[in-house]
Amino acid sequence: MLLAVLPFIALNSQQSGTTNVILEHAESLTFDRSRDAERQVLRGNVRFRHEGAVMTCDSAYFYTDNNSMDAFGNVRMVQGDTLFGYSDVLYYDGNKKLALMRRNVRLINRDVVLTTQNLDYNRAADIAYYFNGGKITDPTNVLISQRGYYYPPSKVAEFRNNVKLTNPDFVLDSDTLKYNTFTKVAYIVGPSTIDHTDMRIYSELGDYNTETQFVSLFKRSVIETNEGRVVTGDTIYYDRAIGLARAYRDIEIKDTIQKIMLKGNIARYNEATGEAFITNKALAIDYSSQDSLFLHADSLFYLKDSIYNNMKAYHGVRFFRSDLQGKCDSIFYSSRDSILTMFFEPVLWSENNQLTGDLIQIFIRDGAVDYIHVQGNAMAVMQDTDTLRFSQLVGRELRAFVIDGEMRKVEVNGNTQSIYFPREDDGTLVGVNRTESSFMTVHLQNNKVHKVVLYPGASGKMMPDEDLVHEDIFFPQFAWHNEIRPQRKEDVFIRTAPPVRDNTDRRRRRR
């Protein structure tokens, strides 16, 4: 009978600072000192209590000398009114306050359920951990991993090795993850991917609120949509509920279908409108053709609809491609008509040619320049082979036609004037030719003036090269802006004031 052994139970030994495991109930107790001097065998509705925890089972071994017990069958451990543990087997050490739960383990903390086959629960530290596979579920998510740690007071769980978080809206795979079962925030602390039906997120550091779907990403994270848009940055804040992403430091926004990349240090991307804004060392790279275009401005806006993409650049625009360079204040491009428009003091260079005017439009076909339209105060300047002379065309507007990357023909309309330097077949300079007419067509060969057609009612004169004064070889509005011309892609970030034309010596002769 149980009452017969109660005096013996009270004689157990314990370590300093610990309390006794108390046996409160059992239907039978047997003890055979000759067979096992340390173990009592308990059967039938066994119940123990230890420092606020109640443990029940079908049968148990009780080791009073070690202040421990082994419980078997329908094991249940209750701590307070919020923590409940279930298993087939429980090994409990009262001195260490360590519970080892084995087979069919469930640990329930309010609406959080942890299931595994092997769980160690350190009551002193209030930590539960598993080491050969486990799962935690709450009303929002299901998390599985090879190893896991759960801290009931803080509601925080740590997962390691083959971690998978399954949410109705996404699946998160990771090597290491922390999760707060109260706030529903997952903390990314290792290489992780988050797969939605329409996008994938990669990060090695960050946090994801699985209820509000607001994600903070650090350490070179990436968001990639199924539509071919990729956002990369050192810091990204993404609110999936409204489809808005903000990124900071070393950012790349790439459209892999249109082959456009935006770079900078501050960016905003709106999924609903498809608009991207980027500033602070903003750079746009068009790599749709073999020769990439690099464009810098204070601010870049990129908007893509279902078919076409548009880009706007504001203030301090400079761009470089091996066959084309430019500078202006603002620029607009639409793939709908493949026209790039330059506003406010635009300057465009190609080989030894320079175009200026009030507005310049570049018409693009199959990734290459087809022709260029300059409107208002149009001027074309072509540097001669000796680099000392400049052929010049001026008028209200002009069109420059490009074939195989080389300017072949220029049409000038409205009060046209020209200065060019004809040469003999052997290259000997003949002199300077100045003409005026209503319309003019200039044919070029090897970036040199080959033929000039004037109509109707043209006038002109040929002057010998000797004793020419400045006014003979330069129009008043002439300026050669080579000092501000980007010579390589890195130069788009260099801002240089345009050279000031010095006309004080109006009688300066040609050397």
Image (tube, helix red, strand yellow):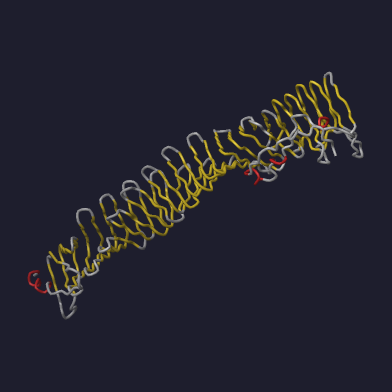
Q: Quadrant of residue 435?
A: top right
State left or right for residue 30 relative to residue 290.
Answer: left
Q: Quadrant of residue 115?
A: bottom left
Look at 67% across and 28% down and name the residue there.
358
| Vertical position of residue 241 compared to residue 415: above or below | below
Residue farthest to the bottom? 34
Residue farthest to the front? 504
Q: Residue 99 location in percent, x, y?
A: 25, 65
Look at 56% across and 38% down and name the residue there.
299
Residue farthest to the top? 457
| Vertical position of residue 216 compared to residue 462: above or below | below
Classify the position of the C terminus by image quarter.
top right
Between residue 411 and residue 18, name the one nearer to us: 411
Between residue 355 and residue 2, name the one nearer to us: 355
Residue farthest to the left? 3
Between residue 273 and residue 131, name the one nearer to us: 273
State left or right for residue 264 relative to residue 1.
Answer: right
Q: Quadrant of residue 312?
A: top right
Please indicate, yes or no, whether residue 400 appears anywhere in the rendered image.
no
- Tell how many labels: 0
Q: Residue 85 location in percent, x, y?
A: 24, 58
Q: Residue 128 location in percent, x, y?
A: 30, 60
Classify the position of the N terminus by image quarter.
bottom left
Q: Residue 303 location in percent, x, y?
A: 55, 34
Please indicate, yes or no, whether residue 62 appears anywhere in the rendered image.
yes
| Vertical position of residue 163 compared to residue 98: above or below | above
